[in-house]
Amino acid sequence: MTLRAAVKLADTNEAPLTVLDVVPAVPRLRAAADVERLRFVTLARSLGLGLDDIRDILGLRDRGEAPCGYFRGVLDRQVDAVAERINQGGLVR
């Protein structure tokens, strides 16, 4: 199947499509922007960000606002929380 046929079948625009194996046995076509968004969510979750913070960051970006300051603040809170856990546990940095 050609890309054009896949796009027509998916009833979407001709945005670049890529295969994303959400479930290994079921590859799905996703727009490149969707893949980038999923990568960000995965990265943010791996850094310990909650879903509310991730939603806020994506909302800022979707509205065309730079989320950098907000994101930096969230990460600073994460660093402070980890440092507090280290101090409470008596662990050495």
Image (cartoon, rainbow, N blue to C red):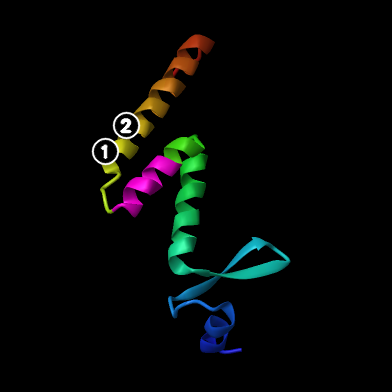
Alpha-carbon neighbours of circle 2 within 10 Å: few (<14), some, or many (≥20)? few
The location of residue 16, given as percent across then percent down, is 44, 76
Looking at the rendering, in which quadrant would you find the C terminus? top left
Q: Is residue 34 left or right of residue 20?
A: left
The location of residue 68, given as percent across then percent down, is 28, 43
Q: Amino acid at mark 2?
A: Gly
Find disc 1 in the rendering and name its residue.
Answer: 69
The location of residue 27, given as percent across then percent down, is 65, 69
Alpha-carbon neighbours of circle 1 within 10 Å: few (<14), some, or many (≥20)? few
Q: Amino acid at mark 1?
A: Gly
* Secondary structure type for disc 1: helix
| Residue occupying image coordinates x 56% and y 88% | 5
Q: Is residue 70 left or right of residue 19?
A: left
Looking at the rendering, in which quadrant would you find the N terminus? bottom right
Q: Is residue 70 above or below residue 22?
A: above
Q: Is residue 87 left or right of residue 9?
A: left
Q: Main secondary structure of the magenta part?
A: helix
| Residue occupying image coordinates x 44% and y 42% | 54
CA gap, disc 2 and disc 1: 6 Å
Find disc 2 in the rendering and name its residue.
Answer: 73
Span shown in magenta: 55-63
| Residue occupying image coordinates x 46% and y 43% | 44
Residue 32 is inside the magenta segment: no
